[in-house]
Amino acid sequence: MLIFAAFNGKFIMKNLVFIILQLSICSLSAQNIESFRPGEVWPDNNGVHINAHGGGILFHDGLYYWFGEHKSEQTSAALVGVNCYSSSDLLNWKHEGVALSVQEGDIESGCIMERPKVIYNAATDKFVMYFHLELKGKGYSAARVGVAVSDNATGPYKYLNSYRPNAGVWPIDMSEPQQTDTLKVSDFKDWWTPEWRQATKNGMFVRRDFAGGQMSRDMTLFVDDDGKAYHIYSSEENLTMHIALLSDDYLSHSGRYVRLAPGGHNEAPAIFKREGKYWMITSGCTGWDPNEARMFSSGSMWGPWIQHPNPCRGLDAHITFGGQSTFILPVNGRPDTYIFIADIWRPRHPIDARYVWLPIGFDAIGLPVIEWTKEWKLEK
C-alpha cells in the first residue's frame, strides 16, 4: 500500500476500495462458478460483470448463447449494440463480442435497442435477431421492431430493417363491429375512464395505427415444436400484448396475429411451453421500478389466454424480487426444467444492472411457481 502514500487520504480510500472490488471480481472469475446467485455481480471469463441486459438465450449445437443490451455507465441508450456470450453450463460465460453493432441509419449510436432475442431457422440455416428499436432523439415514439440476420450464432449480424408490424392487417380475434367502430383516441379528454377502457378493449388504438402498423415495444420470440416462430410484443401504447406469427424464414411478419389482455397494460413478456400448454409471464408498466409479475396460460398461441395469480413466492415476491421478466429458458437435456430470467434495473448506473435467474417449479395442480433463493444449483 506504500505506493499510495503521496496521495490524499480520501483519494487513497476511494481507490483502494475500487481496487479491492476489482480484485475480488477477478478472483471470482478465475474460479469455476458453481451456483446461481440472483442479484449479485456475475463476472464473465474476463472478470467483468456480464453486460447483456433485457436478454434472451439460444441453445445451438451444444452451447448456450446469451444476447443482451450493452449498457454504459451513465445511459441506457445504445452506444455499442447487442452483446453475445457463450456457455456450456449456464454459469460460466465467455464474452464473444458485439453481435450487432450500432451503425449509421436507424440503429445509430444513441438510439434505443432493447430486449434482443435470437432464434435459429433450420430451413434457411440462419440466425435471426429481433429487438425493440426507438430512433435517436425521438423518445419512445417510434415503437418499432428491428430485424437482423447472421450465418453464425455469435455474429456479426447484418441489420435488415425496422418497422411497425402488421400494417393494414386486423387481428384475427377482432370482430367486424370492432374494426368499423368510429370511436377515436381524440374523442376522449381523459384516459382510464370506464368508457375509455372499453373503447381500448374494442380496438381503438389498433384502428388508430392500422395503416402504419402496430406499435412494438417490449418483446420476446418463441419457436414452437412445429418450427413456427412468434413475435410477442407490447403494443397499443403498452396497453395490449400482441402475438404475431412470423414468416417461414423468420424475417418478417405473416400477417396473422391476436391480442392478449386488451387494455391490461402488460410489458416484459417471457414465454414457455409445458405439456401442451403455453405459459406467459409479464409485468405491469411502472417504468424502471419493479412491480408484481402477471401470469397467463392458454392451450393455443391464438388463445384464449387466462390470467393466473402472481407465480412468485418468498422475499419481495410482490415486486418480482426487484426485477422484471425478460426470458424463460427450457434447459437442454433436462426434461421439465425451466429457468425464469429477469433484470434488476439500475437506471442511474445502467451497466451495473443485475440478473435474477431462478428455477420454475410447479404446484399440485400444475401452476408454475418461482421461489426466491439467494443461491441454487441445477440438479445433477
Image (cartoon, grey):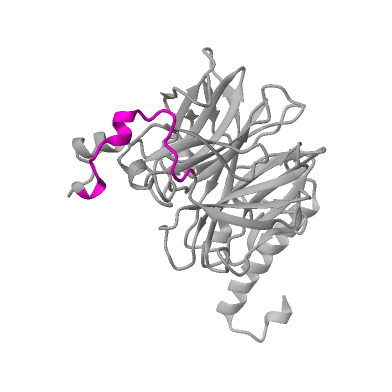
Q: Is residue 185 visible?
A: yes
Assign the magenta stretch its main secondary structure.
loop
| Magenta-colored stretch includes residue 99 | no
* 321 displayed left or right of 86: left
Camera-side residue of 3 and 124: 124
Camera-side residue of 306 and 40: 306
Location of residue 12 by image quarter = bottom right
> What are the residue bounds of the magenta stretch?
166-186
Q: Position of residue 192 (x, y in %)?
A: 23, 42
Location of residue 342 by image quarter = top right
Camera-side residue of 195 and 317: 195
Q: Residue at x 42, y 58 (%)?
A: 140
Residue extending farthest to the right is 61
Residue extending farthest to the left is 189
* 341 displayed left or right of 281: right
Please state, as top left, top right, bottom left or bottom right, where the N terminus lies in the image: bottom right
Q: Position of residue 263 (x, y in %)?
A: 33, 36
Position of 62 relative to 304 (above/below): below
Q: Position of residue 223 (x, y in %)?
A: 64, 33
